[in-house]
Amino acid sequence: MTAAVEHIKKEIRSLGPDEIEALLRDLQNEYVLPPADDEATSIEAEWDAEIDRRMQDVIEDRVELISGEECDRDTDALFAR
């Protein structure tokens, strides 16, 4: 890291808890860090594989599909307990 960054880190360490909280909130509002490319790609690939597995289960009749209404009834019954 550059000397400037090290200086900023040193200054932050001298702040009180309220000042640090305010600084973090300001930084969060001003800057949005994108996920690391490999992390985002990995998560997307995992979801794609999960979707493929679930679709294959439907195609090969390994799961029983239910209507939205039946799903709502089951969910309501579950939360009513």
Image (cartoon, rainbow, N blue to C red):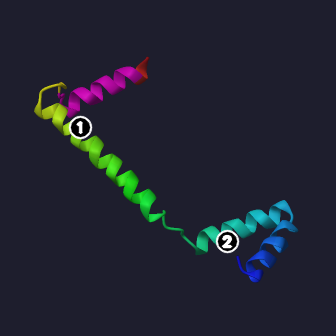
Disc 2, SS: helix
Q: Residue at x 84, y 74 (%)?
A: 11
Q: Which residue is found at the position 70% from the left and 76% from the top?
A: 1
Q: Nearer the viewer, mark 1 or mark 2?
A: 1
**Quarter-of-image position of residue 75:** top left
Which residue range is magenta in the image? Answer: 65-78
Q: Residue at x 83, y 72 (%)?
A: 10
Which residue is more in the foreground, 22 or 61?
A: 61
Q: Is residue 46 above or below residue 56?
A: below
Q: Amino acid at mark 2?
A: Asp
* Nearer-the-camera pick, 50 or 76: 50
Q: Is residue 54 above or below residue 15?
A: above
Q: Residues within 10 Å of mark 2 (few under 14, many from 20)?
A: few
Residue 80 appears at what percent x and percent y? Answer: 41, 20
Instruction: Name the main secondary structure of what is drawn in magenta.
Output: helix
The question of residue 43 being in magenta is answered with: no
Q: Is residue 42 left or right of residue 14?
A: left
> In front here: 22 or 59?
59
**Residues at circles 1 and 2 in contact by the CB criterion of under 8 Å:** no
The three-letter amino acid code for the residue at tag 1 is Arg
50 horizontally vs 59: left or right? right
Quadrant containing the C terminus is top left
Measured from the top left, where is residue 62 in percent x and y? Answer: 17, 25
Query: Distance from label 1 to label 2 (Cα)?
Result: 43 Å
**Residue appearing at x 35%, y 54% in the figure:** 44
User: Residue at label 1?
Assistant: 53
What label sits on residue 13 in the rendered view? none
Q: Earlier in the sequence, mark 1 or mark 2?
A: 2
Residue 26 circle label: 2
Q: Picture coordinates of residue 13 (x, y %)?
A: 84, 66
Q: Secondary structure at mark 1?
A: helix
Furthest toward the top, the residue is 81
